[in-house]
Image (spheres, rainbow, N blue to C red):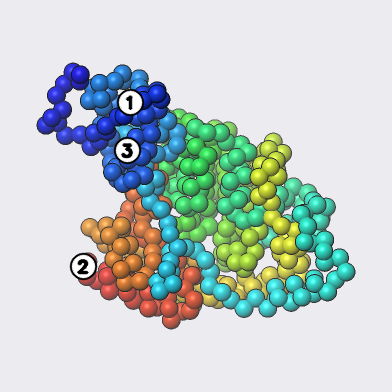
């Protein structure tokens, strides 16, 4: 029996354990995971102290500690000495595609555009005698494809030799291979408090713990990194320096310098995501260019050139090249020969510049629409950004705002989808202005959002 009476004692979680053949700590961990998945335990809920929970369940403290450790390693929990243990925010928030009747401002999927350059290239390739060779796996001997990668990497301020490039079928697969290759379950990776959902899902699948780094002026702080190194034992950090997803912040030169210095001093790896690096009008030197022995950089093409090009060029330190290449090979995450050939021809012929320019024009038009309609609210993202980050008025809950928007057939994603840790640092929403089919459709959606916001005043 419990030592104390809990009849009238407030507890955020009162699990009922069905004791069976499994060890009690496994049963408790399974129950905790089940209650998170079902919504019994909401994001940000503070769990009872381990000693109180052990007394309530009439089990050993070590049993609770082991159960919490299992769930913590899965990314389900977030906690620190002195503050308690909380349900991780991102673990109870899933993204779903928009219905046909809904205007999609959720996923970042740039609207269909004229791709005559790609059509022409494919037509030319089909008439060549050796067309069948690009319908096979990549042989690794297509050196001209590597040369094309160096052209784009140089434009993204990341100089690399052609023989060092690794091919990936998109940025998310580049992240997956990196984590598979150099991290193990239970390792900790530093990220922004609001971060790209793709790395949240991959880290969760692999049992890698994401640690939110404290910020100053919208970007990682030196104090925050030092704290995470000392207290959380992070093995690396993941960053998007240009148009950070979801906040669309562009990292300052001083922050890039600081992160490079921290990586060298503390011997951790930087995973640098260049998904939007080609969209900037004033590119800044990559962190890889500052400290190549501590940095992995990858440049993906689908968001900036053509959605059809699920292609990334990746460059790593020599010490990680083999393990990451093996991860790509073992689970077949490499880019196809067909896509790699199309990308190479687009780049080496210079035709990619037309596609890139066209995308920038579209984004400038979409951002102008957003500024006109939502200009009276706190929105971030310059004229080349794929999204706008909307900080909601004080007292407005992002989940409720998301729900009200969907009721009016507009899909957006609020802070909870991007938050790492025990809470969302700000109530906001990512508005993917690049996704609606037309500018008129975007304007309708933003007008609906403005009307919802105005009722909150």
Across and down, in percent, residue 63 comes to 35, 22
User: Which of the two marks, 1 or 3, is nearer to us in this view?
Assistant: 1
Return the residue nearer the eye: 394 or 42. Answer: 42
Circle 3 residues within 10 Å: few <14, some 14–19, many ≥20: many
Q: Is residue 82 above or below residue 326?
A: above
* Residue 172 in view in this figure: yes
Pick the residue in front: 444 or 282: 444
- For the residues carrying marks 2 and 1, which lies nearer the camera in this image? 1
Disc 3 marks which residue? 86
Q: Earlier in the sequence, mark 1 or mark 3?
A: 1
Left or right side of 106 for 159: right
Under tag 1, what secondary structure? Answer: loop
Q: Are marks 1 and 3 in contact (CB under 8 Å)?
A: no
Which residue is found at the position 69% from the left and 42% from the top?
330
Above or below: residue 280 compared with residue 40: below
Question: Residue at the location (38% across, 64% down)?
Answer: 412
Determine whether the residue tagged by mark 2 lies in a helix, strand or loop: loop
Residue at the extreme front: 20
The residue identified by callout 2 is: 457
Asked if residue 183 is positioned above or below residue 389 in the image, the reply reads above
Residue 407 image-quadrant placement: bottom left
| Mark toward the start of the polypeptide (2 vs 1) | 1
- Give the residue at mark 1: 19
- Which residue, as the protein is rendered here, is positioned at the far left? 8
* Cβ atoms under marks 2 and 1 closer than 8 Å: no
Q: Residues under labels 1 and 3: Cα distance?
A: 25 Å
Query: Which quadrant is the C terminus positioned in?
Result: bottom left
Q: Is residue 232 above or below residue 222?
A: above
Give the residue at x 77% y 54%: 138
- The residues bearing labels 3 and 2 have C-alpha atoms spaced at a distance of 32 Å
Q: Secondary structure at mark 3?
A: strand
Separation of marks 2 and 1 at Cα, in angstroms: 52 Å
């Amino acid at each position: 029996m419990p030592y104390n009476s809990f009849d009238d004692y407030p507890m955020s979680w009162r699990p009922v354990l069905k004791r069976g053949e499994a060890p009690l700590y496994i049963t408790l961990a399974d129950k905790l995971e089940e209650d998170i998945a079902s919504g019994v335990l909401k994001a940000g809920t503070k769990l009872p102290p381990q000693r109180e929970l052990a007394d309530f369940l009439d089990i050993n403290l070590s049993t609770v500690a082991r159960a919490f450790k299992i769930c913590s390693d899965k990314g389900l929990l977030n906690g620190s000495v002195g503050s308690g243990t909380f349900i991780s925010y991102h673990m109870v928030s899933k993204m779903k595609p928009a219905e046909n009747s809904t205007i999609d401002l959720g996923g970042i999927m740039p609207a269909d555009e004229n791709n005559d350059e790609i059509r022409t290239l494919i037509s030319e390739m089909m008439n060549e005698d050796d067309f069948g060779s690009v319908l096979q796996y990549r042989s690794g001997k297509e050196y001209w494809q590597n040369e094309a990668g160096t052209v784009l990497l140089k434009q993204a301020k990341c100089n690399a030799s052609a023989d060092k490039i690794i091919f990936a079928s998109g940025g998310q697969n580049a992240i997956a291979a990196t984590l598979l290759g150099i991290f193990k379950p239970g390792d900790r990776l530093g990220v922004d408090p609001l971060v790209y959902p793709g790395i949240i899902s991959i880290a969760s699948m692999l049992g890698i713990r994401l640690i939110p780094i404290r910020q100053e002026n919208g970007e990682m702080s030196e104090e925050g990194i030092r704290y995470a190194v000392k207290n959380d034992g992070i093995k690396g950090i993941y960053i998007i320096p240009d148009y950070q997803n979801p906040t669309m912040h562009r990292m300052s030169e001083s922050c890039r310098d600081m992160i490079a210095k921290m990586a060298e001093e503390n011997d951790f790896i930087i995973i640098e995501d260049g998904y939007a690096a080609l969209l900037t009008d004033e590119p800044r030197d990559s962190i890889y260019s500052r400290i190549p022995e501590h940095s992995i950089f990858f440049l993906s093409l689908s968001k900036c050139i053509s959605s059809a090009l699920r292609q990334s060029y990746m460059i790593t330190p020599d010490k990680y090249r083999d393990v990451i290449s093996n991860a790509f090979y073992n689970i077949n995450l490499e880019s196809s020969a067909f896509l790699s050939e199309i990308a190479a021809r687009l780049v080496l012929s210079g035709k990619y510049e037309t596609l890139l320019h066209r995308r920038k024009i579209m984004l400038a038009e979409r951002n102008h629409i957003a500024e006109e309609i939502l200009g009276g609210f706190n929105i971030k993202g310059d004229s080349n950004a794929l999204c706008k980050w909307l900080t909601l008025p004080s007292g407005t809950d992002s989940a409720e705002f998301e729900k009200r928007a969907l009721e009016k057939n507009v899909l957006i994603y609020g802070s909870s989808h991007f938050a790492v840790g025990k809470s969302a640092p700000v109530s906001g929403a990512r508005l993917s202005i690049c996704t609606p089919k037309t500018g008129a459709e975007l304007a309708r959606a933003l007008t609906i959002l403005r009307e919802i916001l105005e009722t909150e005043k």
